[in-house]
Image (tube, rainbow, N blue to C red):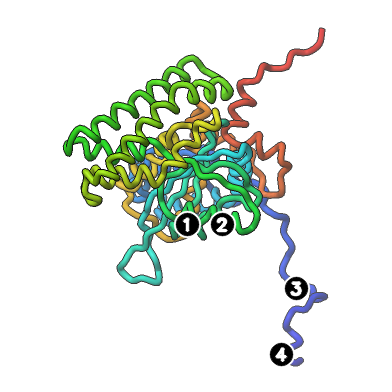
Amino acid sequence: MCASSCIPTVDHPFQAPITAPLHLLQDRCIATPRLLANTLVLRFEQHLPYYRIEQLYARAGVPLSRQTLCGWAGMAAEASGLILVATKDEVFADGYVQVDETPVKYQDPDRKGVCGTGYCWLFHNPVRNLSYFAWRTGRGADSLEKIVPADYRGIIQCDGWKSYNRFVKNRAEKGHSIQLAGCMAHARRYFYDARAEGEDAAWVLLQMQKLYHIETRLRDCRAGPATIRAERKTHSLPILRQIKARLDDLVVRRKHLPRSLTGEAITYTLGQWDKLLVFLQNGRVMIDNNLVENAIRPTAIGRKNWLFMGDPKSGGRAALFYTLIGNCHRAGIDAQSYLTDLFTRLALPAQTTKTLRALTPHGWAADRQSPAETPAP
């Protein structure tokens, strides 16, 4: 018999068996949902590096290698991908997001002995109190182009990084209207750093303090967007006009050198002026970007512990779990309880939009806060 006749064909009785797809995470590894959730909470909420998690489990009599733990994280991230997509859709649904990014080192196989620099981008929806992390190896406009949905229209609140202007210009060429809103806190920091140079920086800080007093009063009385807009027009706009007049006068008189701290503060603030006034036009828009900066802090805490990502792909994995765990905190639920239930219920085949939204942290929390149905008498 010819050797080639032993090669299995489509009709050959010894072809590879056809097995049913593995639907649940429990079918893919020995880890229970609770163990998976505990591992991910230790990594992305407690910010422990994998070698310390390995040591914790070893002391508890559960020997697990770092490679195994990383594999579990990758498997759980793959299964939770659609939950991330559903969260992203909700974050961009209202036409107003705040954005910030933070650098994170990662091991690059193409650079032997040298770590590359990637960025965790965070998009926060203040209306729904939802956040979405995304990982990219760059900080340019092309990274924003890949993250922000192609059909997005509305306001993006950010700092003065040039990539945001370039991104908005690229979208405008395609006929998509996006408006940038500035961050008063960024402008304030420049003047705060310059406060020792003289009275001009101190005067601007005092006027900005008045602006923040107005915002605090509006927040404390839980004013709606229409009331906020009217109050800002009445009380905040005159203060901003005074600041602008003072800064313009300082520029004309050349009182401060451009490279002095006060000079840099004036240059930055005047360069962002139109963007800094956007919050006057829309009662939903915040005066600053502090909410998104507070939300991105966990990545900075983790970076001090684990120093760098193991590879470029692990950045996307981290972004997914930072999104889920961060939104658990905003929804007021325990991250481990949520992840345990998610991994128990999560199936790999396609889900309906309704099912996916119910599995997001906010949907999960709302489902448990809704009153139980009572049987009809």
Is residue 79 visible to us here?
no
Q: Earlier in the sequence, mark 4 or mark 1?
A: 4
Disc 4 to disc 2, how far (Cα)? 52 Å
| In the depicted structure, whether residue 62 falls above or below residue 173 | above
Q: CA distance from mark 3 to mark 1?
A: 46 Å
Type of residue at label 3? Phe
Q: Position of residue 234 (x, y in %)?
A: 48, 21
- N-terminal label among 3 and 4: 4
Q: Would you name the residue on which mark 3 appears?
A: 14
Left or right: 185 with respect to 95?
left
Q: Position of residue 139 (x, y in %)?
A: 43, 57
Closest to the observer, 215 or 267 = 267
- Residue at left 35%, top 48%? 49
Secondary structure of the residue carrying tag 2 is helix
Q: Residue furthest top?
A: 377
Tags 1 and 2 touching, CB below 8 Å: yes
Name which of mark 4 and mark 2 comes first in the sequence. 4
Q: Amino acid at mark 4?
A: Ala
Amino acid tagged 1:
Arg
Q: Please determine whether, in this image, residue 118 is positioned above or below residue 25.
A: below
Residue in the image at 65% along x and 20% along y = 370
Spatial CA distance of label 4 from label 1 is: 51 Å
Give the alpha-carbon distance from disc 3 to disc 4, as whole Å.
15 Å
Q: Which residue is mark 1?
A: 136
Residue indicated by mark 4: 3
Residue designated by label 2: 146
Find residue 22 and report its horizontal and vertical position in percent. 67, 52
Q: CA distance from mark 3 to mark 2?
A: 46 Å
Residue at horizontal 29%, vertical 27%?
Answer: 206
Q: Which mark is residue 150?
A: none
